[in-house]
Amino acid sequence: MKSWFKNKMHARNKQEPSAGMLRLLYFRLVIPVLRSVDQPEIVARGVMMGLALGMTPTVGVQLYMVFVVWWVCRYVLHWQFSLIIAMAWSWLSNPLTMLPLYYLYYVTGRLLLLDFDPEQDFESFSRTIGQHLTFESGLWGTVVEVFHFMLEKAGTSILVGFLPYSIGLGLIGYWVSFKLATRYAEARKKRLAGLNTIDGASS
């Protein structure tokens, strides 16, 4: 697995679609976690909040949501997380992934609500979204469009269906990123200590 990942990440394979996507995700999402100078706890909170807010059905406004939540947490609740990392991870929910994510939320919500009436298939669901979500009305107009679609066209299914993914991925993201950030922070300390030892011996 490790050798497969290294092979995919090699520059010679960057023209392959799968390798290109893997490289994009790695450099956009993982590298900021590894290179952050914040404490592992702050980094992990950033990943958690980015995933939790990014998985909400608010494509088009989630970056604004991340900033508002960060500001409230930092200056009102005095609870910090990395804004940059949170914004990076909220990007997983974007116009390209919106249709499959919203449909997943829709189906999940119907199951959780025990709604077994005939549901829309993915094609008709996509057409409905295309007709009602344009993302061309500015920030407030986009918010109104999104919530009108969810309440009027998809019922409450999406509003219920996103919760397991938002909460679950947020918690998993925190756990994984905390371990990863802690490991790299310790490795960085050892490396710096080794350099200081060499410099001390040289002088």
Image (spheres, grey):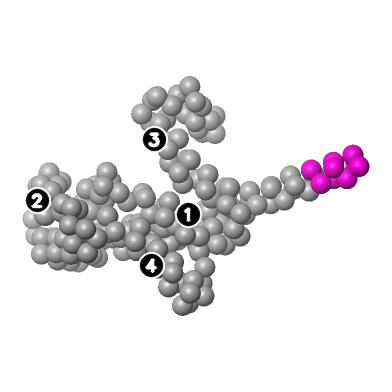
Chain-order first, disc 4 or disc 1: 4
Chain-order first, disc 2 or disc 4: 4
Q: Which residue is mark 1?
A: 85
Chain-order first, disc 3 or disc 2: 3
Q: Which residue is mark 4?
A: 68
The mark lying in front, picked from 2 and 4, is 4
| Mark 4 surroundings: few (<14), some (14-19) or many (≥20) residues within 10 A | few
Residue 200 magenta-highlighted: yes
Q: Is residue 61 left or right of residue 188?
A: left
| Mark 2 surroundings: few (<14), some (14-19) or many (≥20) residues within 10 A | few
Vertical arrangement, residue 19 with respect to residue 117, above or below: above
- Residue 21: give its label: 3
Q: Look at the image and give the residue range highlighted in magenta.
A: 195-203
* Callout 2–callout 4 Cβ contact below 8 Å: no
Residue 108 visible, this orientation: no
What residue do we see at 38% from left, 54% from top? 90
